Image: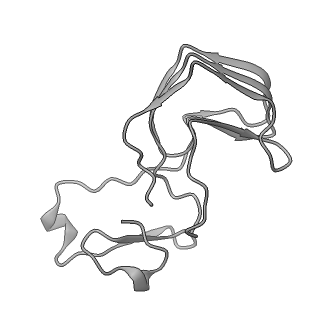
Amino acid sequence: MKKWSVAELREEGDYFYDPRAWQVTLRSHANPAALYRNIELALRRHIIDEGGRGYVTYEDLALSCGAAHGIGGGGTHHITVRNCDFSYIGGGHQMTRPTASPFASAMGWSSGRVRATTLSKAAAYGKSTMPR
């Protein structure tokens, strides 16, 4: 479970990410390499980075397994998402604070707010990977 400081690592599997050091600390009773076949860390990247774009339509896409937004980026305007399926979105390290917003299927922003994004027949499904 994601924690907000090394001091909070109390249970097996608790982890903390230090963005300045680019380092993950994992709580484990033994060497994790001896306990697990693999340990996976999601990279915080949008599946589609639409930064700086406008007047774009995304249609009939299936977007899955992205650690940030399915479709995301800053400085966007007049974006349409139609008949798209989103699954298993989120889970990448966004901000080191418990009040950080979770990742969304489709998100565009400009001047600190969402701008003219239209969703039509978009479905989001699958297990949320965003730690609570």
Q: Quadrant of the C terminus?
A: bottom left
Q: Nearer the viewer, residue 130 or 42?
A: 130
Q: How many marks?
A: 0
Q: Position of residue 112 (x, y in %)?
A: 81, 50
Q: Residue at x 70, y 32 (%)?
A: 50
Across and down, in percent, residue 40 comes to 33, 53
Q: Residue at x 45, y 52 (%)?
A: 130
> Would residue 67 be found to the left or right of residue 57 on screen?
left
Residue 79 found in image quarter: top right
Furthest-top residue in this view: 60
Q: Residue at x 59, y 63 (%)?
A: 95
Q: Where 15 sits versus 103, above or below?
A: below
Q: Is residue 115 left or right of residue 70?
A: right
Q: Residue furthest right?
A: 111
Q: Position of residue 63 (x, y in %)?
A: 49, 27
Horizontal relation, residue 96 to residue 2: left or right:
right
71, above or below 100, in the image: above
